[in-house]
Amino acid sequence: KNIAIFASGSGSNAENIIRFFQKNDSAQVSLVLSNKSDACVLERAHRLGVPSNVFSKEDWIAGDEILAILQEYHIDFVVLAGFLVRVPDLLLHAYPNKIINIHPALLPKFGGKGMYGDRVHEAVVAAGEKESGITIHYINEHYDEGNTIFQATCPVLPTDSPDDVAKKVHALEYEHFPQVIEQVLRNKY
Ligand code: GRF
């Protein structure tokens, strides 16, 4: 099975997933796509020997150039890991129930890119939440509202800063995301 990862930023999750499947031959990350030419994820992909490409905002809206490269690389499954652009309907229809995303909070609370963006941990702390965590879910045309596949939680202490929460949430991402992808590919969900 060939996986493509879409990422807009640092790509620590992308690197973690690539490394996992370099050791686990049930699938492989065959392509990394981004919307930002200076995203660190592109350096990580290059260092790990994974082909990558960057597309413009217009291409991410139209979708046909993206679909063409996914087909060129025989992609079966798409993973969003810190991807801050809406997936075009053309791709949603070409990959039904084959695109998953990770959200660094417990959806449906604190969802919606527009609402919190990358300040989701500030919102969790400000709301006085006792716990936070990750949500791995299918995506649909409404961004963070696809069916939930997996959630894991971490405690939020009254003394925690947003950065403390971010560290705990990232740890959950690194611990769970690759295995959940593998299980979804084996149709365990
Ligand atoms: C992660 O916290 C992920 O949950 C969110 O964006 C962040 C991406 O981090 N969607 P990285 O680029 O994988 O380091």
Image (cartoon, helix red, strand yellow):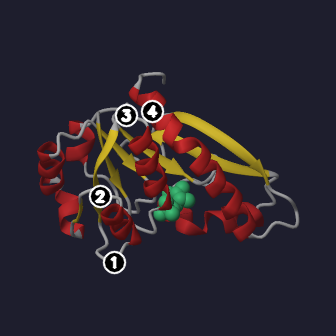
The mark closer to the camera, 2 or 4, is 2
Going from N to C along the chain, the mark reached first, 3 or 1, is 3
Tell which tag, 2 or 1, sits nearer the viewer. Answer: 2
| 161 on left or right of 114 | right
> For the residue marked with disc 4, what is the amino acid?
Glu
**Displayed quadrant of residue 27:** top left
Could you tell which of marks 4 and 1 lies nearer the N-terminus?
1
Does the beta carbon at disc 1 come under 8 Å from ligand 1?
Answer: no
- Mark sitting on residue 182: 4
Is residue 143 visible from the viewing direction of this image?
A: no
Image quarter (top left, top right, bottom left or bottom right) of the N terminus: top left
Q: Which mark is residue 38?
A: 1
> Which label's residue is closer to the chain start, 3 or 2?
3
Q: Would residue 94 appear left or right of 98 to someone viewing this image? A: left
Label 3 crowd (10 A; few <14 / some 14-19 / many >=20): few
Marking on residue 25? 3
- Disc 2 + disc 4, Cβ < 8 Å: no
